[in-house]
Image: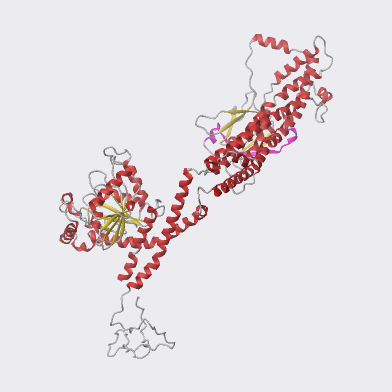
Amino acid sequence: MAWANSGMQALIPVINRVQDAFSQLGTNVNFELPQIAVVGGQSAGKSSVLENFVGKDFLPRGSGIVTRRPLILQLIQDRNEYAEFLHKKGHRFVDFDAVRKEIEDETDRVTGHNKGISAHPINLRVFSPNVLNLTLIDLPGLTKVPVGDQPADIEHQIRDMLLTFISRETCLILAVTPANSDLATSDALKLAKEVDPQGLRTIGVLTKLDLMDEGTDARDILENRLLPLRRGYVGVVNRGQKDIVGRKDIRAALDAERRFFLSHPSYRHMADRLGTTYLQQTLNQQLTNHIRDTLPTLRDSLQKRMFAMEKDVAEYKNFAPNDPGRKTKALLQMVTQFNADIERSIEGSSAKSVSTNELSGGARINRLFHERFPFEIVKMEIDEKEMRKEIQFAIRNIHGVRVGLFTPDMAFEAIAKKQITRLKEPSMKCVDLVVNELANVIRTCADTMARYPRLRDELERIVVSYMREREQVAKQQIGMIVDYELAYMNTNHEDFIGFTNAEAKANQRQSAARNVANLGNQVIRKGWLSVNNVSFVRGSKDSWFVLMSDSLHWYKDDEEKEKKYMLPLDGIKLRDIESGFMSRQHKFALFYPDGRNIYKDLKLLELGANNLDEVEAWKASFLRAGVFPERQVQPVQNEEEQQMTSQETSMDPQLERQVETIRNLVDSYMRIITKTIKDLVPKAVMHLIVNQVSEFMKDELLAHLYQYGDTDALMEESAQESQKREELLRMYHACKEALRIISEVNMSTLASAESAAPPMPSNDYRPQIPRQAPAPPPSVARPAPVPPRGGAPGAPMIPARVPTPSNGAPEIPARPNVPKRPF
């Protein structure tokens, strides 16, 4: 019925208004609006088809690629005939030659004059009494070879642009193909087939049917038998180049098209389904149905997007960038949030934003204290042979010309102080590592204030400067801790071995295994490691390793059912290995110092992980198991140096016993000092740096910011943030406007249906009831239908008409039991 169809026709202008709502606010349409995209090769006749729809010459023409920007063409039925561009809203173009010129100028404004392309569309609305409501997108024609100064990848650029439009499920594809070329080589159908393999969204258009070779026709294609499409094919005949140059009227061309189909023997039987007029009606109907099917999905997408933006929009709703009160409030909020973020990062209470990929903040500092710092202490190179030589020289120098009968305690003190002094280096390195990690935490938390770049930079500068001051204080205090140990040698310490026990063990050499003697056979660490120099696991996933106090177990996976190898740790050393140029792994190796094979025929077992922290943790665990780093090899001495060394180190049994006693004393005392340093240095770092910086930020940071003077400059927004806010507000208002437009669809459709409903025919069996006083239905049961008078058997059961009484409401006649007629 005409009124219902007009209600459906209202859907196309709705989508046009939604499209304008986004374009007018300068917002890209990220939603899949229902539309028709025109796709085809160059000179396939796309422009002629569109001009035939409008009935005017208005599209640019020329050689090579002419359409270099998508043209969103909105055809709107109106009693007046004019065109209007969205970028020149309010300016009506009556001369369609001026429309062509404006399209060319707007294209050159964005793409330049070098035949380049752009995906930014031009919106054109054409109002005319000769068009049906329709929205089409004219896309650049497919090309193969760059012409002139076009970029070398022009084919890929155009292809990517076309796929951007036609890949959307809500886009109908108008595939234009010239009939005088083989359909199997059609670029438009090939591209449409890629995104619509079932042919559900593709409408085929055959142009240039009048240019086919004599004796050939496209009947099989138009009857949808050769390459079937769900929506079929429509054939059209456009004006030729001679007609275009001669300015042949499009109305005359449409009449000639109609005569061609009616007179052609292959097409006359389907002439009512061919031609530009039929194509326009078909597209109108199919687009209308398509919009009706996709409108609920579009509404849901708009609602979801708007709900997602409401939280941010609420913050910006009453936003005044230059309000002093707002700036002061924002400054206080930013500083408070920054302090809270730092505290959560250090204390580890940030549950909602906890990282599951790597350690950070307080967790990394904890690892530095308990894994990296002890490892740096053990890495201090102590050459056993060199130490014994130093002890020997110290004993001899203390005795002087006399022959010493007793072991001198001054030799012990001299050697011990030398070893204690060496603890300063790993202690200072621990401070540096913690300060670097704390600086990373500060930088990460300050990045949340990227909205105010000057505030972020000034706040970070103040906090880092104070942290550097505390770093110097901490290094000074930690240096004093080492000085305290050097100032007084407490040989009465309860853990010190003493001279008596040292002499008793003079002939016994302590081994590295003593450090782990109390561990028993417990598990120290489990985890994944890659084995880099074993052929059968190269390129495969990591293996599962279990480190125990006396052995290293190698499993296929973490279920620990299939054991590959078990390596005893006695006598094994550890060595760092440099990663290759293209490798991202951090590696270390296990080996025997005497050169024995550690695994099958391998002298090195290379292990690695992608994370440096993971490798450092494994090396610290190997230290607990008594596997120490490799010592640097002393350079080979010549014969003269070897002779001098042998003379200097040759000693009698009594001196050798004294050297061994001093060595045991130094070893015992250094274990006490190392334990103390491992305990005090982390405490000093936490007290003098971490806690002091935290207190400074709580108590003094805000005052230092106000000392900056110009708080307005501090709270000046970045250009990126201002642009982001404006884009968010534009998108929100565009979604809101689009939802408002869509919400009017049902109401406007129902209103148009009610107002356009045709009056009842005069011969209808129902009496005309005045609308002012409708009669209520009777409560009595209706009588059985009365057969018509003189009706033959099987005649339709139509009740006799009942005259309307002159007074009172008319009676409701009895009705046959037939379906109701639609209103």
Where, by quadrant of the figure, is residue 296 drawn?
Answer: bottom left
What x and y, as percent, mark residue 322?
51, 47
Where, by quadrant of the figure, is residue 446 drawn?
Answer: top right
Q: How many marks?
A: 0
Which part of the image, by quadrant, shows the C terminus?
A: bottom left
State how the image is colored: secondary structure
Left or right: where 723 falls relative to 106: right
Above or below, 189 relative to 793: above
Q: Nearer the viewer, residue 323 or 477?
A: 323
Above or below, 620 relative to 643: below
Q: Taking the image as drawn, is residue 298 in sight?
A: no
What x and y, as percent, mark residue 521?
72, 37
Above or below, 130 relative to 778: above
**In percent of the image, x 34 and y 62: which residue is there?**
288
Left or right: where 677 falls relative to 443: right
**In percent of the image, x 70 and y 32: which residue is there?**
681
Left or right: where 618 falls relative to 768: right
What x and y, as percent, mark residue 130?
24, 61
Q: Taking the image as drawn, is residue 147 in sight?
A: yes
Q: Which residues are magenta?
A: 516-538
Q: Nearer the viewer, residue 205 or 639?
A: 205
Q: Nearer the viewer, residue 324 or 58?
A: 324
Task: Please tell me whether residue 819 belongs to the stretch shown in magenta.
Answer: no
What x and y, as percent, mark residue 541?
54, 39
Task: Please tell me whether residue 528 belongs to the stretch shown in magenta.
Answer: yes
Which part of the image, by quadrant, shows the N terminus?
A: bottom left
